[in-house]
């Protein structure tokens, strides 16, 4: 799967979960600190990633700092899709 495809699909998914299109412009902000993502939304995002890509990312498998921005989340999915 091409990285651009993963990126585009992830942007759609993250925007849906965060319910804010600002995630497309502010891709390095901490989503938790900005109030765009909380623990329940993070679980919803992980479920969406599994459903969309067949990639399982257990909440205990990554530190919050590894998945607290749009770019970091996309990176975590890309390395698992390619791996």
Image: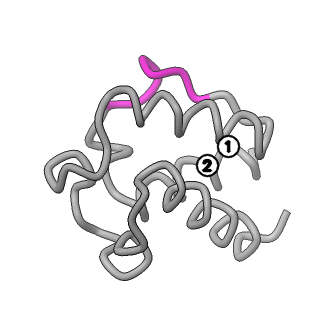
Q: Are marks 1 and 2 in contact (CB under 8 Å)?
A: yes
Q: Is residue 61 magenta?
A: yes
Q: Position of residue 77 (x, y in %)?
A: 61, 49
Front in this rendered view, residue 26 or 4: 26
Label 2 Cα neighbours within 10 Å, binned few <14 / some 14-19 / many ≥20: many
Query: Which region shows up in magenta?
Result: 57-63
Q: Residue at x 33, y 57 (%)?
A: 69
Residue at coordinates 52% horizontally, 33% vertically from top-left? Answer: 44
Q: Position of residue 31 (x, y in %)?
A: 27, 53
Name the quadrant containing residue 23: bottom left
* Callout count: 2
**Which residue is outermost to the right?**
1
Q: Quadrant of the C terminus?
A: top right
Q: Is residue 51 left or right of residue 74?
A: right
Query: Residue 47 — which label?
Result: none
* Relative horizontal placement of residue 54, taking residue 12 as reference (left or right): right
Magenta stretch prevailing secondary structure: loop
Q: Quadrant of the N terminus?
A: bottom right
Identify the residue under disc 1: 80
Mark 2 lies on a secondary structure that is helix
Asked if 71 appears above or below 59 in the picture, the reply is: below
From the viewer's side, name the closer residue of 56 and 33. 33
User: Residue at image x 76%, y 36%?
Assistant: 51
In the rendered image, the residue lying farthest to the front is 19
Judge whether residue 68 is colored magenta. no
Closer to the camera, 75 or 53?
53
- Label 1 and label 2: CA atoms lie apart by 5 Å
Where in the figure is residue 54, as x and y percent of width and height?
A: 80, 36
Q: Which color scheme does this rendered protein use?
A: one colour
Left or right position of 7 against 18: right
Residue behind mark 2:
77
Q: Residues within 10 Å of mark 1 (few under 14, many from 20)?
A: few
């Amino acid at each position: 799967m091409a990285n651009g495809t993963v990126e585009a699909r992830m942007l759609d998914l993250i925007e849906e979960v965060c319910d804010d299109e600002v995630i497309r412009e502010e891709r390095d902000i901490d989503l938790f600190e900005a109030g765009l993502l909380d623990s329940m939304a993070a679980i919803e995002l992980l479920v969406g990633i599994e459903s969309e890509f067949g990639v399982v990312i257990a909440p205990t498998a990554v530190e919050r700092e590894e998945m607290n921005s749009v770019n970091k989340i996309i990176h975590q999915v890309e390395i698992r899709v390619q791996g």
